[in-house]
Amino acid sequence: MKFRVERDVLADAVAWAARSLPLRPSAPVLAGLLIEAGGDGLVLSSFDYETSARATLEAEVLEAGRALVSGRLLADICRSLPAKPVELSLEEARVSLTCGSARFSLQTMPVDDYPSLPTMPAATGTVDSDLFAHAVQQAVTAAGRDDMLPVLTGVRLEIDGDSVSLLATDRFRLSLRELVWRPGTPDETLAALVPAKVLADTAKSLTAGSQVTIALSAGGSGEGLIGFEGAGRGGVRRTTTRLLDGEFPKVRSLFPTEHLTTARVEKAALIESVKRVALVAERNTAVQLAFTDGVLTLDAGSGDEAQASESVETQMTGEDLTTGFNPQFLLDGLSAIDEDTVELAFTQASKPVVITGVGADDDPGFRYLLMPRRLLS
């Protein structure tokens, strides 16, 4: 094996393929990055039996072959190389890398012990890459992080014709992001539970091209997998991940159809106020929000401890109301909204609030539902 490739193209592809390598692999070879040079150019792959990554890039292949080397070490080396072409060759049991006057020799791993990457399911449709990355970033705001409840660490992806919905919840909050895409089959209806972290990392890493292809199997070959493909620097990026098992809770019904109190507030002012007032809130205690006569008053702290209070102007309709929320969860939801003005909609003080952005069409693509916290008396 021997090839030449531009330093930036190689470094970018190696970093992308190595990003999902396990910190503590179940087998030594799973810490490796598979390098394959041939008629298709250069292919870099990683796989840990859950998530696979495959980067195809243009290179001057002088001799076909394949080798397996430490992925993290190769990524560190490529990142430090000078801005000159890179030549890499396999010499017996070692890989030799040359870039300008810099030379490295790396020990190889047994390439025959490396598992075969899963086959990409058939393409289901395409979506604008920037739109998808932003939608995923919003949706994962409410995803759980407790591995004891693996179902809640995922994002439920629902496909219904030209509409895609992304749902996530950790039991205390719920996010819903809806967007339009281009399905391969107009009446396609599919659903999948995708690990939130993998989905977020993947969507963010595939914005170099204009669109992302989503491949989800409805049955048969590739069932239990979802795949994503997009353009990267100098080639194509493709990743697959296993879907999570289990039944995602039926959470759509939690969004109320009518509200007794709504309040519209400038987002930036509310975020800054929450941050300041929350400074005196003890761990696991709520920040109180009181809506009265067009003013939102935030309070935190109680008794002999430090206390804080601040008021923000608001446009209210409906009855006065006092409630409280986990300040970090409230900030997470507010920060995920794009619009400058947010609307907080309540049915009653003891029920969840629905937070949305106020846009020109009043049809929010992102909704964030947050459970209230008990206020200290």
Image: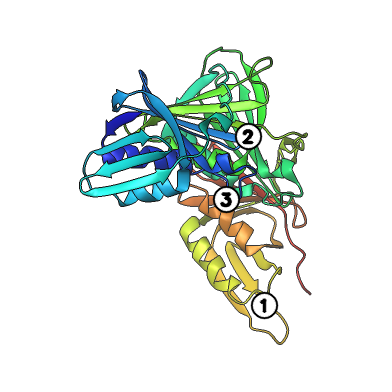
Q: Secondary structure at mark 1?
A: loop
Residue highlighted by disc 1: 301
Decide: few, some or many residues near mark 3? Use Cα within 10 Å; few <14, some 14-19, many ≥20: few
Decide: few, some or many residues near mark 1? Use Cα within 10 Å; few <14, some 14-19, many ≥20: many
Quadrant housing residue 41: top left
Q: CA distance from mark 1 to mark 3?
A: 41 Å
The residue most toward the front is 92
The amino acid sitting under disc 3 is Leu
Q: Secondary structure at mark 3?
A: loop
Residue 151 is tagged as none
Q: CA distance from mark 3 to mark 2?
A: 14 Å
Residue 96 horizontal side relative to residue 143, left or right: left
Q: Mark 1 or mark 3: which is in front?
A: 3
- Where 9 sits versus 103, above or below? above
The amino acid sitting under disc 2 is Tyr
Residue 23 is tagged as 3
Where is residue 92 drawn, in percent x and y?
40, 35
Q: In the rendered structure, which disc, 1 or 3, sits on the residue that comes first in sequence?
A: 3
Decide: few, some or many residues near mark 2? Use Cα within 10 Å; few <14, some 14-19, many ≥20: some
Name which residue lies at 73% across and 43% down. Answer: 150
Q: In the rendered structure, which disc, 3 or 2, sits on the residue that comes first in sequence?
A: 3
Q: Secondary structure at mark 2?
A: loop
Name which residue lies at 75% across and 68% down. Answer: 375
Q: Mark 1 or mark 2: which is in front?
A: 2
Residue highlighted by disc 2: 49
Residue 369 horizontal side relative to residue 97, left or right: right
Residue nearest the observer in this picture, 240 or 293: 240
